[in-house]
């Protein structure tokens, strides 16, 4: 199978979550074979080696140029099979839009994709590998598909120990994962606003929860928060630089663990000495009933 790029150039405008600034995106078809952001003419490849922060969102940097909140766009490119593209950004972060990947996968579908003269290579998990941070972990298992089994566990009655499984395809991304919005807590919103952050944040681009439940309307889909964590993972793991084939069993993931896992699963082709990585010491199915 050949790598694919967009059929034609396309532009989008939106508001950055943290800056509150209107930001323009220009998607430029290419045959260079990777996903590359352009910020003030500096190219920044979508690769874990360029990650400079995983605080709230994933930030990529090269030299003095940075581009933040890349994950929802990368998730759409990964799931919808776009391998090769330049994305010119005229601000410091990718616009938040509705807090999901909807704008991006709808753009890819409406523009369409075309093959380039380069074979697509997948990243395939060859043997079980686990990457852990405290009680959080991602267990990689071989599979001939892109599968995710995800468990969230937050100290909140609606978010306490939920597990769901998915096969990631363009269809499931379009109908289940891709339009799931990010979520946050009212206490966090108030704290960040008081620090002058999330200037572009509103009740239109996140599910906001307080101790009793959702404060801004209805969910788009059951357990939308869990599906959004899967969306983030689909984007973060694309920082391997190739489409992913395998199964990830995830317990309490997040950007920091996701990016660490992308780096380690790649490095695991060679022996590494970190304590946090290795073959799982138990059976393939973890139990969460403690
Ligand atoms: Zn997200």
Image: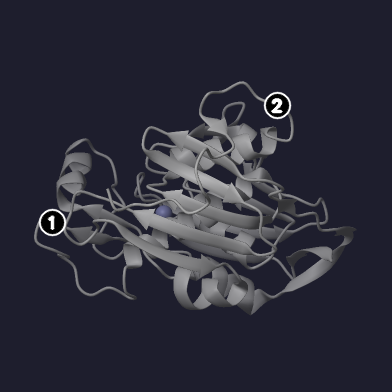
User: For mark 1, does the 10 Å Cα neighbourhood hold few (<14), some (14 to 19), or many (20 or more) residues?
Assistant: few
Ligand 1 is found in which quarter of the picture? Answer: bottom left
Question: Which x, y percent locates residue 285?
Answer: 48, 54
Q: In the image shown, does 281 or 65 lie closer to the viewer?
A: 281
Residue at 64% from the left image edge and 46% from the top image edge: 37
Image side of residue 47 versus residue 99, left or right? right
Q: CA distance from mark 1 to mark 2?
A: 45 Å
Question: Which x, y percent locates residue 224?
Answer: 34, 67
Image side of residue 190 versus residue 198, left or right? left
Question: Which x, y percent locates residue 71?
Answer: 51, 51
Q: Is residue 20 visible?
A: yes
Q: In the image shown, does 220 or 270 lie closer to the viewer?
A: 270
Outermost residue on the left side: it is 212
Outermost residue on the top side: it is 273
The residue that label 2 is drawn on is 271
The residue that label 1 is drawn on is 210
The mark closer to the camera, 1 or 2, is: 2
Image side of residue 191 versus residue 107, left or right? left
SS at badge 1: loop
Q: Which mark sits nearer the N-terminus, 1 or 2?
A: 1
Q: Is residue 219 above or below residue 278?
A: below
User: For mark 2, does the 10 Å Cα neighbourhood hold few (<14), some (14 to 19), or many (20 or more) residues?
Assistant: few
Q: In the image shown, does 257 or 179 lie closer to the viewer?
A: 257
Residue 214: quadrant of the picture: bottom left
SS at badge 2: loop
Q: Is residue 68 visible?
A: no
Which mark identifies residue 251?
none
Residue at 51% from the left image edge and 48% from the top image edge: 283
Report the quarter where the N terminus lies: bottom right
Q: State yes or no: discs 1 and 2 in contact (Cβ < 8 Å).
A: no
């Amino acid at each position: 199978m050949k790598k694919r790029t967009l059929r034609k150039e396309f532009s989008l405008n939106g508001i950055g979550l943290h800056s509150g600034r209107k930001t323009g995106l220009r998607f430029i078809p290419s045959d260079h074979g990777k996903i590359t952001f352009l910020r003030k003419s500096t190219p920044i490849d979508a690769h874990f080696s360029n990650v400079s922060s995983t605080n709230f969102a994933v930030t990529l940097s090269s030299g003095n140029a940075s581009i933040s909140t890349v994950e929802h766009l990368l998730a759409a490119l990964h799931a919808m099979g776009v391998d090769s593209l330049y994305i010119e950004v005229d601000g410091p972060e990718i616009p938040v839009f509705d807090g999901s990947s909807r704008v991006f996968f709808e753009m890819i579908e409406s523009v369409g994709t075309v093959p380039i003269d380069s074979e697509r290579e997948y990243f395939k998990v060859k043997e079980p590998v686990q990457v852990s941070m405290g009680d959080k972990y991602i267990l990689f298992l071989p599979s001939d598909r892109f599968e995710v089994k995800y468990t969230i566990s937050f100290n909140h009655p609606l978010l306490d120990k939920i597990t769901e499984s998915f096969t990631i395809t363009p269809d499931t991304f379009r109908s289940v994962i891709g339009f799931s919005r990010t979520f946050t807590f009212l206490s966090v919103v108030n704290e960040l606003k008081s620090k002058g952050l999330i200037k572009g944040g509103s009740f239109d681009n996140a599910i906001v929860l307080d101790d009793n439940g959702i404060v801004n309307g209805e969910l788009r889909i059951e357990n939308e928060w869990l599906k959004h964590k899967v969306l983030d993972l689909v984007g973060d793991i694309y920082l391997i630089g190739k489409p992913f084939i395998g199964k990830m069993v995830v317990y309490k993931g997040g950007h920091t663990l996701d990016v660490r896992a992308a780096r380690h699963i790649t490095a695991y082709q060679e022996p590494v000495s970190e304590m946090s990585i290795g073959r799982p010491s138990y059976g393939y199915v973890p139990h969460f009933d403690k």
